[in-house]
C-alpha cells in the first residue's frame, strides 16, 4: 500500500534548546538546570542538562546530518535563559544573538526551515524564585518582552513561530503531579498557571502582530493532545472521559484557536472554587489574539474510568483527577521501555476533531516518537542501530495522518521527536528517540536505520507499507 502526502509536506524533527544545546556560555539557570544543581539524584543516572547533545558547539555538523537524512524542517527553541541578560529589562546577550543567528542561517543555507519555539519548560529559575514563575502576571509581561526581542532579532528569517511547548505539562508537572520544578501540589495555583500561560501566549502573539513585517510569518502554539477514551460506555466512564478531554485538550485548544475557554469547564472550575483570576481586558486580549497555526505533540492516548475515591475526600485540594481515574486497558499495546501505550489511530481522531471542532486550522505533528532504552542492543556489524520498531511506529502514525488529510484535515507536516538523541528532563538519556544516535561520552553521532529510511520518504513524499 502506498501512503502519499501533499506537496511541500514538512518532513522534520524537533528538539528544544535546553535539551540539546548544553549550558555553555549561558546567562541564567533555568528551572531544570537549577533542579539538577540541588538534587542530581532526581535525574536518571544523575545525568543533567549541562552538556545535553552539545548542539551549542556542534550545531553545524548536526544540521549537516539533518540535511543528510532529508529533513526540510527543524524545530528547536530559543532559550530565554540564554538570550536575555537582564530578565527585568529584557536586554539581550550578544553572544546568544550570534549563536541563534548562526543556527538559523545554517538551517536556511542547508534548505531546512527553522521552526522556533519560545518556551520549552525552561523558565529562568530567578523568575520562579523571585516572582512565583507562571503564577505571576509580572512574569507574563516579562515573557512578552522576551518574545518581542526574538521577533525583532530573528523574524526576518524565521517564518514559523510557536509561543509555548505543551503548557499542560507545566501545569501538571510543576503544580499537580511533581515532575517539574518547583514540584508544588496546589490545584488552585495549577488552574491560575493554565490561565496565565494562555495570557502570556496571547500577549506574545499580540506583540508578533505588531512587530512582524514578514508576509509569510505566522505564529502558533504547540499542544500535547491526548484523546481520552472511556473504559466502558457506562454514563460514569463517559463523563470521566468527557471531563478529561475538557481539561487535557479543549482548555488550551479552545483558548488558543477561538479565544474562548470551554464554558463547561469554566463552570466546573467556578463551582469547585478554583477558577482563575482574570480581568475583562485580559479576556479581550486572549479573544483577539488567536493562533494562525497549531503544533500537535502526540505520543500516547489516555484511557480513563470514573474516579474511585469520592470527590469529598479531595476537598482539601483540587485535582483534575477528582473527575477521572487512569484505566489500564487489558491487552493495550505498549512501549514497555517508556510505559506509554501505542495507539496510532488517535492521530486520526485528533485530525478529525481539529477539522470539525476547531475551524480546521492548519496544523502539523510537532512531536511524535518512540523512546527506547539500551538501543545499542540493536547495533549491526556496520555500527548502525537497526531501529525497525521506530520505522514501524512512524509508518503507522503517518498512515493515520494521511488518512486524516484524505478526509479533509489541514495537516501540513510531521516532526519526529527528535533528530539526534537528546537529554530528556528527569529521564535524561534513558530513552532514546532520535534518527541519529549520540554517544554521550564521545559525542559521536551515527545515523540509525530509521534516518536512512526517512530520507527516502522525504525525497519521495510517500512510502510503501
Ligand atoms: C515531550 C516533550 C519533549 C520530550 C518528549 C519525550 O512531552 O515536549 O521535550 O522530552 O516529551 O518525553 P520524555 O522526555 O519524558 O521521554
Image: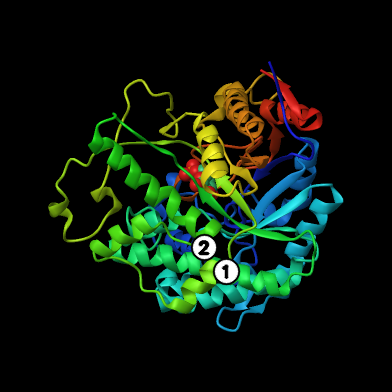
Measured in 3D between alpha carbons, the distance from the residue under mark 1 to the one under mark 2, in whole angstroms, is: 7 Å
Q: Is residue 302 visible from the viewing direction of this image?
A: yes
Residue to which mark 1 is pinned? 288
User: What colour scheme governs how the chains and residues are painted in the rendered image of this protein?
Assistant: rainbow
Q: On the rendered structure, is 51 left or right of 446?
A: left
What element does badge 1 sit on?
helix
Q: On the rendered structure, is 10 left or right of 232?
A: right
- Residue shown at 60% from the left, 84% from the top: 89
Tell me which numbered mark, 1 or 2, is placed earlier along the sequence: 2
Q: Look at the picture and state if 109 lies above or below 135.
A: above
Residue 405 point in image, percent of width and height: 65, 34
Q: Nearer the viewer, residue 143 or 2?
A: 2
**Quadrant assignment for the C terminus:** top right
Q: Residues within 10 Å of mark 2 (few under 14, many from 20)?
A: many
Q: Look at the picture and state if 46 lies above or below 238.
A: below
Residue 98 falls in image quadrant: bottom right
| CB under 8 Å between discs 1 and 2 | yes
Q: Nearer the viewer, residue 344 or 338?
A: 344
Residue to which mark 2 is pinned? 259
- Residue shown at 58% from the left, 49% from the top: 359
**Quadrant assignment for the N terminus:** top right
Residue 86 falls in image quadrant: bottom right
Amino acid at each position: 500500500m502506498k501512503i502519499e502526502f501533499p506537496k511541500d509536506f514538512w518532513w522534520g524533527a524537533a528538539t528544544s534548546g535546553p535539551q540539546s544545546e548544553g549550558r555553555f556560555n549561558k546567562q541564567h539557570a533555568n528551572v531544570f538546570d537549577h533542579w539538577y544543581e540541588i538534587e542530581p539524584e532526581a535525574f536518571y543516572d544523575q545525568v543533567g542538562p549541562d552538556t545535553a547533545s552539545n548542539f551549542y558547539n556542534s550545531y553545524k555538523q548536526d544540521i549537516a546530518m539533518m540535511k543528510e537524512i532529508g529533513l526540510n524542517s527543524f524545530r528547536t527553541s530559543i532559550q530565554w535563559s540564554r538570550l536575555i541578560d537582564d530578565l527585568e529589562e529584557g536586554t539581550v546577550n550578544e553572544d546568544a544573538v550570534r549563536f541563534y543567528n548562526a543556527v538559523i542561517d545554517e538551517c536556511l543555507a542547508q534548505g531546512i526551515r527553522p521552526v522556533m519555539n519560545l518556551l520549552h519548560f525552561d523558565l529562568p529559575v530567578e523568575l520562579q524564585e523571585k516572582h512565583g514563575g507562571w503564577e505571576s502576571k509580572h512574569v507574563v509581561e516579562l515573557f512578552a518582552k522576551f518574545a518581542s526581542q526574538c521577533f525583532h532579532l530573528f523574524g526576518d528569517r524565521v517564518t514559523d513561530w510557536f509561543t509555548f511547548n505543551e503548557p499542560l505539562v507545566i501545569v501538571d508537572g510543576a503544580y499537580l503531579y511533581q515532575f517539574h520544578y518547583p514540584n508544588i501540589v496546589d490545584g488552585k495555583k495549577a488552574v491560575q498557571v493554565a490561565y496565565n500561560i494562555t495570557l502570556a501566549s496571547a500577549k506574545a502573539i499580540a506583540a508578533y502582530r505588531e512587530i512582524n513585517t514578514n508576509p509569510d510569518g505566522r505564529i502558533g502554539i504547540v499542544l500535547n493532545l491526548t484523546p481520552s477514551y472511556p473504559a466502558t460506555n457506562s454514563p460514569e466512564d463517559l463523563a470521566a472521559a468527557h471531563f478529561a478531554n475538557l481539561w487535557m485538550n479543549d482548555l488550551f485548544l479552545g483558548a488558543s484557536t477561538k479565544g474562548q475557554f470551554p464554558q463547561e469547564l469554566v463552570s466546573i472550575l467556578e463551582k469547585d472554587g478554583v477558577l482563575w483570576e482574570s480581568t475583562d481586558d485580559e479576556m479581550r486580549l486572549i479573544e483577539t489574539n488567536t493562533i494562525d497555526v497549531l503544533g500537535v505533540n502526540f505520543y500516547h492516548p489516555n484511557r480513563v474510568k470514573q474516579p474511585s475515591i469520592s470527590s469529598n475526600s479531595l476537598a482539601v485540594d483540587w485535582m483534575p483527577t477528582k473527575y477521572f481515574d487512569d484505566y489500564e486497558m487489558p491487552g493495550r499495546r505498549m512501549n514497555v521501555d517508556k510505559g506509554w501505550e501505542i495507539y496510532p489511530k488517535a492521530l486520526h481522531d485528533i485530525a478529525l476533531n481539529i477539522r470539525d471542532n476547531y475551524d480546521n486550522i492548519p496544523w502539523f505533528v510537532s512531536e511524535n516518537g518512540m523512546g527506547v532504552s539500551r538501543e545499542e542492543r540493536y547495533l549491526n556489524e556496520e555500527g548502525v542501530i537497526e531501529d525497525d520498531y521506530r520505522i514501524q511506529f512512524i509508518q503507522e502514525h503517518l498512515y493515520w495522518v494521511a488518512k486524516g488529510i484524505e478526509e479533509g484535515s489541514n495537516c501540513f507536516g510531521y516532526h519526529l521527536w527528535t533528530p539526534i538523541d537528546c537529554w530528556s528532563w528527569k529521564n535524561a538519556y534513558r530513552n532514546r528517540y532520535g534518527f541519529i544516535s549520540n554517544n554521550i561520552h564521545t559525542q559521536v553521532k551515527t545515523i540509525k536505520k530509521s534516518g536512512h529510511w526517512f530520507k527516502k520518504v522525504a525525497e519521495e513524499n510517500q512510502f510503501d507499507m
